[in-house]
Image (cartoon, rainbow, N blue to C red):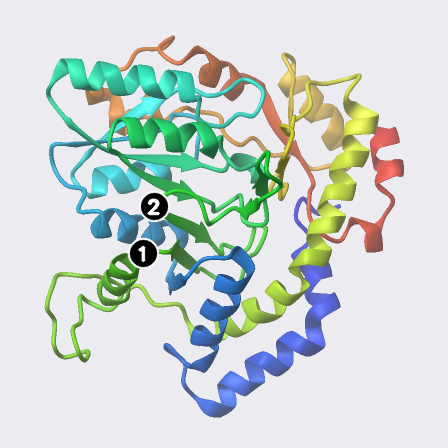
Amino acid sequence: MQFIDLQAQYKHLKTKIDKRIADVLNHGKFIMGPEVLELEQALANYIGVKHVVTCANGTDALTLSLMVLDIKEGDAVFCPTFTFFASAEVISFANATPVFVDSNEQTFNICPIDLEKQIEKTISEGRLTPKAIIAVDLFGLPANYPELEIIAKKYNLKLIEDAAQGFGGSITNSDGVTKKAGSFGDIATTSFFPAKPLGCYGDGGAVFTNNDDYAKLLRSYRVHGKGSDKYDNIRIGMNSRLDTIQAAILLEKLAEFPRELINRNKAAVNYEANLANLYMTPQVPHGYESSWAQYTLLSDNRDKVMADFKKQGIPTVIYYGTCMHQQTVYANLGYQDGDFPVAEKLCKQVFSLPMHGYFESLFSTDSISQNL
C-alpha cells in the first residue's frame, strides 16, 4: 500500500500526460513556454482570483510574497509553530523575525486567540514592528480566515495564506458564498511538490492575488527583477520560474483534480466512520471543506499504534514531530518548552494515514479501516 499513490494517478492520466510532455518536447520552449501561461489562467479560473504567478517551488512562492510586501529586518511576521519549516524559514530569509503562535486543538491550524495575544505582546515589547501573518492551511483544511481577516485589519497587518496543503479546500460563509483556498488574505501561495493535493513531477509553486500591483511585482521578482525585458533589471529579484514540462503535467492533473477531491473526501468520511471510536479524528468546521492533504489522527500511544499499522502493511507518517519554536536554529529567540502547549502536545500525538485520490480504483477503504 502506498501512502500517496502517484503511480496510480499517472496510470490513469498516462495518455494525456505523455501527450502534453511530447508537445513541449516538440515545440522546445522549456522555460516560460505557452503551457505556463495556460496553467496560470486555468488556476486563476479554478481558485477565483485575478492573478496567478507561477514559480519554482512553494518556498519561493512564500519568499516572493514577502518581497512584494516589503518584509525586512526589524519586522515581525506571525506564523504557527506547528507547521512545516518553510513557513518560518522564509521569514528569517527576509531578515525579519518569526513570532510563533499556538494551534487550535480541533483544527490544528493557527489559533486566532493566541495570535492576538502574540500581536499584543509584540507591540508592548516594542522591539519589532508587526507587519504580517502567515496562516497555513494545515492537512488540507483552510485556516479560520473569517477571524484572521478581522485581526489583520484591526492591527493593520498583511495576511498571507500558505495553501500548499490546502489547495482544493474552501469556506462557505453564512450568505452561502464559497471561497476556495488560495483566495484568502492579501496574497496566497501554494506548492506543487509531488505529495501535495495538486502536485507535479518535480518542484513547482504559485502565488495568487487580486492586487494588480502585487502581480506586476511578482512577475518581475521571479525573473531577476526584470523590467521591460530580461536585460533591463530594475530591482533585485530571484530566478524562480516554473518549467514548461511541469506546467504541462499540472494542466492535466488540474483537469482531473475535482474528481480526485471527491474520492479524497469519500475516503475521509470512511475513515471517520470506522476510526472515530478508536482515535481522535480530524474535525472539519461547519461551512469548511478540506482537500485532505493528509488524514491525521491523534494517539497518546503513537509509537505502538504506528508499529501495529506497519505490521499490517499500512504506512504512516508523522507531520510534524517538532514545533518551530523548538527547532535548533530558533533557540536564540528565547522560546521555552511549554510556551505553546497545544502545538507541543500535537507534535507528540499526530500521525497520518494513507490519503490520495485513487483509493476507489485500488482497494476498498472499508476493508482498510476494518483492518485498523
Q: Is residue 357 above or below residue 201?
A: above
Left or right: 135 as drawn, with respect to 175: left
First reached walking from the N terminus: tag 2 or tag 1? 2
Q: Quadrant of the C terminus?
A: top right
* Crowd rating for badge 1 (residues with CA inside 10 Å; few <14, some 14–19, many 20+): few
Where residue 296 appears, as percent x and y from the top left, is: 63, 30
Residue shown at 62%/44% (left/top)? 291
Is residue 31 or residue 5 the one in the foreground? Answer: 31
Circle on res. 283 = none
Q: Is residue 16 above or below residue 88?
A: below
Q: Quadrant of residue 198?
A: bottom right
Left or right: 371 as drawn, with respect to 349: right
- Which residue is tagged 2? 186
Residue shown at 43%/75% (left/top)? 37
Q: Quadrant of residue 253?
A: bottom right
Q: Quadrant of residue 322?
A: top left
Where residue 169 appears, as percent x and y from the top left, is: 59, 44
CB atoms of marks 2 and 1 within 8 Å = yes
Q: Amino acid at mark 2?
A: Asp
* Crowd rating for badge 2 (residues with CA inside 10 Å; few <14, some 14–19, many 20+): many
Q: Amino acid at mark 1?
A: Asn
Circle on res. 211 = 1
Is residue 174 or residue 255 the one in the foreground? Answer: 174
Left or right: 256 as drawn, with respect to 107: right
Question: Tag 1's secondary structure?
Answer: loop
Name the residue furthest bottom: 26
Question: Tag 2's secondary structure?
Answer: loop
Q: CA distance from mark 2 to mark 1?
A: 8 Å
Name the residue furthest top: 338
Is residue 314 or residue 56 the one in the foreground? Answer: 56
The reply to whether residue 370 is visible in this rendering is yes
